[in-house]
Amino acid sequence: MLSAYYNVENVDQDKLSSAIETMLRAVGNAKINANITFDMGPGAFSDPKEYGRAKRAFFVQLFDKIDTEFEEATNTALKLFNEALPADEKARNKEIAAEAAK
């Protein structure tokens, strides 16, 4: 994205800036959410197995949320990026992708 911002003629730099900001925000939010801890101790449960199940369920749900939010932000950023590119650059990228697929 940064390369396109500086090197592609007629690119919409405002949309590219928004795409970059979206990705940076997504990375920051993922890092923040990954540092959330399970706030209940073993004493809050009747036995250690119940505590383990609850803790595991908490983290599965947390990381599913992180993954979903990051994927949504990535898709949003890619849409903005694609909208920012001029038509001739999009055509060139398709040709390069077709060659690479061979």
Image (cartoon, rainbow, N blue to C red):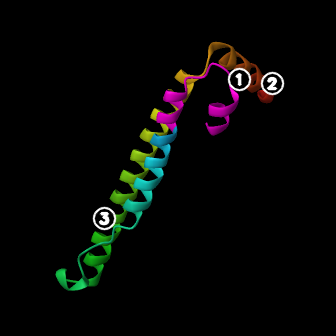
User: How far, Cα to Cα, is label 2 from label 3?
Assistant: 45 Å
Q: Are marks 3 and 1 in contact (CB under 8 Å)?
A: no
Residue type at mark 3: give it.
Phe
Q: Earlier in the sequence, mark 3 or mark 1?
A: 3
Residue 48, by quadrant, is: bottom left
Q: Residue at x 20, y 86 (%)?
A: 43
Horizontal arrangement in the rendering, residue 11 relative to residue 48 (left or right): right
- The residues colored magenta run 1-19
Residue type at mark 1: give it.
Asn
Q: Nearer the viewer, residue 66 or 73?
A: 73
Residue 93 tag number: 1
Horizontal arrangement in the rendering, residue 54 relative to residue 71 (left or right): left
- Would you call the spot at circle 2 few (<14 residues within 10 Å), some (14-19), or many (20 or more)? few
**Residue that label 3 marks:** 58
Q: Nearer the viewer, residue 24 or 33?
A: 24
Q: Earlier in the sequence, mark 1 or mark 2?
A: 1
Q: Residue at x 76, y 22 (%)?
A: 98
Residue ranking furthest to the bottom: 43
Residue 99 tag number: 2
